[in-house]
Image (cartoon, grey):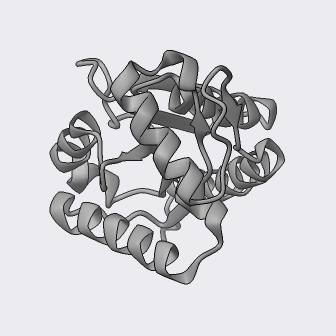
Amino acid sequence: MTRILVVYGTTDGHTAKIATAIADTLRTHGAAVDVCQASRTHCLPEGHDAVIVAAPVRGGKYLKSIRRWVRQHAAVLNAKPTAFVSICLGILQHDEAVDRTLKTIIGQFLAETGWQPVVTKPVAGALPYTRYNWLIRWVMKRIATKAGGDSDTTRDYEYTDWQDLARFAEQFGLLADRHHATASAPAMVTV
């Protein structure tokens, strides 16, 4: 059985929800999946056939806990199938300048950490206005309004395409299964 680790960083809980959805899809397809927050000490990639890391973009970068965790485990991550799920509302704008900015943010993160994931998947996140403090709510409303997004701060908005996320998880699970089967196949010996 293929063992997959899903590591995430979150500030408002939506990335945890995304990580859980990925894990549920992988389990449905027969994988043994561990899910943990990057800030936890027991979150280790060793003993897993593949790893998925999910993190939101905040202020033009990823959470410190994710950056630290990936940097610390980059050598192990680079030796197995891995995926990076980047959660960012900017992808909803379908704007080339915003897409370039996100690619730059991802590129800087990967260069800073030394990690080269096999797959990078941008995913739209959420606007949980009701969970923000007044300052974050005000900032996020300004950003959303400028981008033509939802700005009623009395409610929360979810933009994640759950079906697309499930397809991604299924495809990654197949990749991990192929790697697991190859890695656990006995070596052919010629006598």
Picture coordinates of residue 166 (x, y %)? 77, 45
Against 74, is 130 above or below?
A: above
Q: Does the image show residue 191?
A: no
Q: Residue at x 59, y 77 (%)?
A: 95
Side of 157 where 85 appears, left or right: left
Picture coordinates of residue 33 (x, y %)? 58, 28
Count the labels in the image: 0
Residue 38's image quarter? top left
Frontmost residue, 9 versus 173: 9
Q: Residue at x 35, y 37 (%)?
A: 45
Frontmost residue, 14 versus 187: 14
Side of 189 where 123 appears, left or right: right
Picture coordinates of residue 53 (x, y %)? 44, 44
Residue 72's image quarter? top left
Frontmost residue, 28 versus 166: 166
Q: Residue at x 62, y 50 (%)?
A: 124
Q: Residue at x 24, y 34 (%)?
A: 65
Quadrant housing the N terminus = top right
Q: Does the image show residue 23?
A: yes
Picture coordinates of residue 66 (x, y %)? 29, 40
Against 72, is 86 above or below?
A: below
